[in-house]
Image: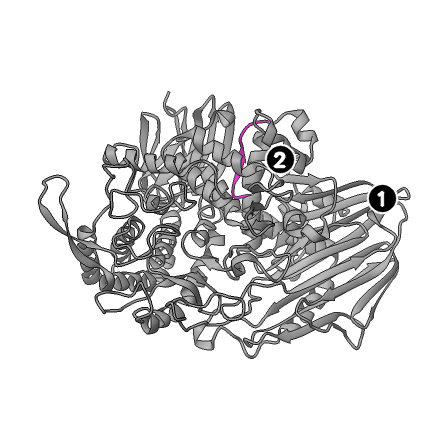
Amino acid sequence: MDTQRTDQPEHLPSRRGLLSLAAATGTLAALGGLPAFTASAEPQRPTASAVPADDDTTALWWRAPADDGSMIEQGLPIGNGRLGALVGNDPGRERLFITDATTWTGGLNDTLDDDGQFPYARENFGSFTLLAKLTVDIPDHDISAVSDYRRALDLRQGLVSASYVRSGVTYRRQIFASLPDDVLVVHFTQSGGGRYTGTISLDGTHGETTTGSPAGRYASFGAAFPNGLRYGAAVTAHAGGGTVAVNGPRITFRNYTSLTVVISGGTNYAPDAARNYRDPGLDPQKLARTKVLRAAGHPASTLLHTHVADHRALFERMDLSLGASTAQQRAMDTWERIRARATDTDPDPELEAAYLQYGRYLMIAGSRGSLPLNLQGLWLDGNDPDWMGDYHTDVNLQMNYWMADRAGLSDCFDALTDYCLAQLPSWTELTREHFNDPRNRYRNSTGRIAGWTVAISTNIHGGMGWWWHPAGNAWLCNSLFEHYEFTQSRSHLARIHPMLKGACEFWEARLLTTTVEDPETGDAKEVLIADSDWSPEHGPLDAKGITYAQELVWTLFDNYRTACSVLGRDSAYAQTVESLRQRLYLPRVSPKTGWLEEWMSPDNLGETTHRHLSPLVQLFPGDRIRPDGSTPEELVEGATALLAARGMESFGWANAWRSLCWARLKNADKAYQLVVNNLRPSTGGSNGTAPNLFDIYEVERGRGIFQIDANFGTPAAMIEMLVHSRPGHLELLPALPAAWAASGRVTGVGVRGGFVVDLRWQDGRPTRVTVRSVGGRTTTVSFGDSSREVTLAPGRSITLHDLGR
């Protein structure tokens, strides 16, 4: 086995270098070779090209525009982490359904109903909702009057585009969401002497009135919800070779050769419980006007290159190839390929790689500098999303972030951390006031209360909905702690330490002592168990000692002990927590079913094929159950039997969780089949992938429902099939399916313990692996029966060749 070690730490390119790199791409060529620079930076000329002309794993395309009545399945998503939109690309009527992550109705919702639940409806809990709709009408460009139509989503550039021919003239448009300028941009061009005439309308979706500015520079609206949240949006436009005018609520344009439309908006939401989650001094309408006018003062090319540089700085941290697709597959548009993959037994590895990259694109577009991704991500087609587009704490919110650290997007995880910390004061107060309410079926039998926990649903106003979810605090804390395991960021660990401690205090007050038979000696043994709870989301509502809670709390306590050790604080309470952990009851395998018990019963008390894998949280995302000899074989077999009983057909997010579990068990065939299952088209009443690659499932409500967690959970499973890690251990190709085995590569994979991995393989075996430290010191790199311990200083890397030969 050959080894290479770098002599110096690796250095990331500078911000200026990234801008120069983006300017050198094909995007620059399409815009006439203009330099890329930010609104305040000096221009810098490009030096080299960075993107292949034809990158089949990051370019998606379609032959038809979206149907305005089916935007959630056909509209193409753009976003800058706060502002988002679904884009339709109809030649004669461009439509953007615009969201702001903080546009929420409802409120604190701090009372219990007669059943001991928090009310859970739009009128009290509230809902994620649309901010606005933008329409650009071009009356003489109806789809029936054009030819050679094509629209595309460039994942690498963060760019939606469309083109078509009318009367011998080629018309093009580019649409993107810029984080640096905090605007959405729609840029229309043509080649061949064409002209455009039409109108631009910006409309609210809650009865707002749009007005034009006295000087004719923009159109805007502003309003407030009954909860006091103020919101607003604005649009402006400038043209080349024609005229633009603001006429009341609409902007008209006539005989233009190019047109740039700039939109922004937002709310006065503030992530601060002390201010009731509001910034009373902020005028969202006025701020939106300022942003669009400032951005419109720069050429479209400047806005585009600034955006592309920012987007690619994140997107290009990871790349992969899972093998080559055929020329016939490449000739099909994206929707045709998805449908063909469902009926063809031949794999389409470039499509599968593109699906993973699409998940990364959505993460960059939806989780930066604002709220975390909710059930809908950042995208809506109306004001009534299912489950209010909330933050579900019994798997969905956590699953949204399983991919981030693994896929080179640790920066995008910060939105989840920020949300939890901003909500913590409200969660703590609601727990103190209401958890031990006599109406709450999950109240503590001890009568004591401390710390904090959450309900199954949470909103952005500090509020909760539906049933209390006692173990939700442990799962959220474990997710936040795992981010530390990937990044080794002590500052992150210090930020979340009070949150971990509050969760531990809650469980110290909640745990009950009971007596069980020691399976090894047969003697009576006192253990600690969780009070009455519900194993999400089935079975008895009030069982004690459910596996789900026991496992999550066991990990919470272990993580708190580690956090205190790393930070050098709170050692006395860490010892208390560790003593509690040692006494926790841990689940057993049922002698009747052979499955890992979900409840403290040999009988299965729920649905055999239920969508949730609640008792398997220590298979994934935890790893106390390991098929490597360190876990009792009976426990691994019991977890495997339970997983098999749950089946291979479920909703997209549930399939993703199953795939991750099978990957942990090193069953490549089953893990891969579940990925393929999620790639099936969602038409005809089945669960699967929509034309725009959103995960859709059909239920009794009579329509397809978008829920974004599968778009992140499935890519996480694909990465887990290629690289598995825990602190101190890194395993290569643990569940590599035959479809990807011939050859492939992946770069920039984050691994627990504080490392990043680049990997190449051939014929199912790794041929080259580079391990780079981002804070980790020592880890074991293994493949099959071969392993190598490596020790690195932060910033250093080592390359191993032909591991296992």
Amino acid marked by disc 2: Ile
Along the polypeptide, which appears first: circle 1 or circle 2?
1
Q: Which residue is mark 2?
A: 338
Range shown magenta: 315-324
In which quadrant of the rendered view does residue 569 lie? bottom left
Q: Position of residue 340 (x, y in %)?
A: 63, 30
In the image, taking residue 313 as reference, residue 86 lies left or right, namely: right
- Local crowd size for mark 2, using a 10 Å CA cut-off: few (<14), some (14–19), many (≥20): many
In the image, taking residue 283 as reference, residue 659 lies left or right, namely: left
Scheme of colours in the image? one colour
Quarter of the figure with the C terminus: top left
Picture layout, residue 800 above or below residue 196 = above
Distance between mark 1 and mark 2 Cα atoms: 26 Å
Picture layout, residue 458 above or below residue 694 = below
Check whether the beta carbons of the residues at disc 1 and disc 2 lie within 8 A of each other. no
Quarter of the figure with the N terminus: top left
Q: Position of residue 556 (x, y in %)?
A: 29, 54
Q: Is residue 218 rendered magenta in the image?
A: no
Q: Which residue is mark 1?
A: 146
Amino acid marked by disc 1: Val
Picture layout, residue 732 above or below residue 504 = above
